[in-house]
Image (cartoon, grey):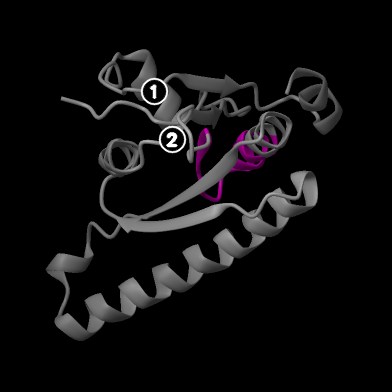
Amino acid sequence: MPRRRQSHEPGHRRKFLVLADDTPECDRALYYAARRAARTGGGVVLLSVLQLDDAPSQWLGVADLMRAEATDKAEARLDLLSARAQGVSGIDPERVLREGAIAEQIHRIIEEDEDIAILVLAAGTGHEGPGPLIASLAKGGWASLPVPITLVPGTLSDTEIDALA
């Protein structure tokens, strides 16, 4: 049974969870979450997930090297996104780095942190569709999430998001 959300209890604050990846729409989700958190006294959690599906089949040294390179890349991305959130809203986001399947890690962090109250995703703008996470949502694979999901159109400008957030 999912844990009860605590974001409005004394000593807690509502957090917006953003998946920190290298897609262009990630910035739209982060911008919305940071602006919304700033206006509501909340926080932002940046989740970066390492997907190292090939690592277990590699030699130990190669797998370690793959993991180290992926970790360095993810940390650099988290640095950039943290700076962006601070510049947009003055909020210093929490940074979480995990390894595994993205959907599983999103479920896991929401279960672990009872202050996470909203998952913020942005839709892709390319011809290949809205993005794999949004596509999986459309198939109903995320009906068990204990928090609402905010989908930000990937085409919105900073000014347009400011008016909404």
Q: In the image, what residue occupies the spot 51% across and 67% down?
A: 75
> Would you say residue 109 sits in the magenta stretch?
no
Dot 1 corresponds to which residue? 147
Q: Relative to residue 82, is residue 32 depicted above or below?
A: above
Which residue is more in the foreground, 99 or 61?
99
Say what amino acid the circle numbered 1 marks: Val
Residue 67 figure quarter = bottom left
Residues at discs 1 and 2 in contact (Cβ within 8 Å): yes
Q: Amino acid type of disc 2?
A: Ile
Disc 2 is placed on an element classified as strand
| Image-based side of 83 in relation to 101, left or right | right
Residue 82 drawn at (x, y percent): 64, 56
Spot occupied by residue 123 in the image (x, y as percentages of width and height): 57, 25
Label 1 and label 2: CA atoms lie apart by 8 Å
Residue appearing at x 34%, y 37% in the figure:
110
Element type where label 1 sits in the image? loop
- The quarter of the picture where the N terminus appears is top left
Pointer 2 residue:
116
> Does residue 91 lie above or below 70 as drawn?
above
* Label 2 crowd bin: few (<14), some (14–19), many (20+), radius 10 Å: many
Report the residue at 22% width, 62% height from top.
54
Residue 117 lies, in percent from the top left, at 45, 28
Q: Residues within 10 Å of mark 1 (few under 14, many from 20)?
A: some
Whichever of labels 1 and 2 marks the residue nearer the N terminus, that label is 2
Residue situated furthest right in the rendering: 159
Q: Which residues are magenta?
A: 14-31
Q: Quick check: 85 left or right of 134?
A: right
Q: Residue at x 61, y 34 (%)?
A: 29
